Amino acid sequence: MIHPDVIRRAAEIQLKFQQAKPFRHVAIDNFLLTDNCESLLRDFPVFDEKHATNELGLTGRKAVVEHVSNISPFYRAFYQYINSETFLDAVSKLTGIQDLIADKTLFGGGTHNNLSGQGLDVHIDFNIDERNMLHRRINLLIYLNKEWEEAWGGAIELHSDPRNAALDETASFLPLFNRAVIFETNEYSWHGFQRISLPPDKQHLSRKSFSIYLYTKDRPAEEVLAPHTTFYLPQPLPANLRVGHTLTEQDMLELHIRTQGRDGLLGMYQKLLVEKEQRLRDFMKLNQGEISSYQGVISSRSWRLVMGLHRLKYRLRHLF
């Protein structure tokens, strides 16, 4: 279903991917055959609040449908294609990352429908699918918006160092119809998009995309870390807030939104920390007689050994 011209230019596209800054990525226009992309848009599900629960457990303005095979016959065929060796081999040729593995559950992926008012805080993704202990390596996003302007927000932004505005290198892409943005996921692949603000006569539109996340069994040794969740950065203060500036009603609304988002993130991470601590305590209670198992969880020396073996396996595998 990928356009043949894209496959023909695979070597050229891979070179762009490998050389891109702030981290490896590439944007490809006319990624799918036109009829296929038209079908994705034609059958795209309407916004449904039952699919719009966010990380804080609240109903938001972003709806995600993971079980795409239930949407339509075309989506069922598309789902089968993105899980095929043909598709995985094509993405490997476009990126240079070999032995890619599809996630048949499309966890966190599938159709993403963002209404006006929705944004995505800059973040790095979770690094390991702990269900299968696979390393997350590639995000492939296909955009489905025939009408979109830069002033509306919603452009995906890639960052090198979002904590340091003076040194931060960025790249951004509008979410235009049949544009694919492919980027690696690691500990510095920061990305997100500014809050969508559609004009009054465009409120019927939404930011539509299809997200695909791909994995590998191993990854470069220097990138191996303990499993972690997605890390979000709170939005900084608006740039126009300077000494002597008189706050407007719009300024106050913006400050409210940003501080509310920051407080929500703090609450989410507190909840995750408590839950992880409880799981550790439950494990310890179940295995209190098995000292070796207990030490395997809490001993940093044991963790270093596991990571050392993992790195050795990776080097041996790529030696020849």
Image (tube, rainbow, N blue to C red):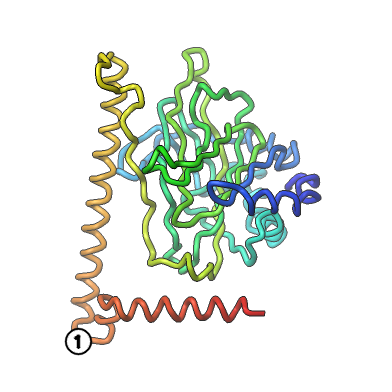
Q: Which residue is located at x 34 percent, y 36 percent?
A: 235
Total labels drawn = 1
Q: Report the side of 9 relative to 164 (left or right).
A: right
For the residue marked with disc 1, what is the amino acid? Answer: Gly
| Mark 1 element type | loop
Occupied quadrant, residue 143? top right
Which residue carries the number 1 mark? 289
Instruction: Answer above or below: position of 158 versus 133.
Output: above
Image quarter in which the C terminus is found: bottom right
Crowd band around label 1 with a 10 angstrom C-alpha radius: few (<14), some (14–19), many (20+): few
Instruction: Answer above or below: position of 114 versus 280.
Output: above
Q: Looking at the image, which is closer to me, 52 or 288?
A: 288
Q: Which residue is located at x 73 percent, y 47 percent?
A: 2
- At which x and y percent is residue 15? 70, 52
Q: Which residue is located at x 45 percent, y 67 percent?
A: 224
Q: Which residue is located at x 22 percent, y 78 percent?
A: 286
- At which x and y percent is residue 301? 31, 80
Q: Report the side of 116 relative to 155 (left or right).
A: left
- At which x and y percent is residue 288? 19, 82
Q: Looking at the image, which is closer to me, 269 or 243?
A: 243
Occupied quadrant, residue 304? bottom left
- At which x and y percent is residue 32? 71, 42
Q: Looking at the image, which is closer to me, 1 or 67?
A: 1
Q: Looking at the image, which is closer to me, 12 or 108?
A: 12
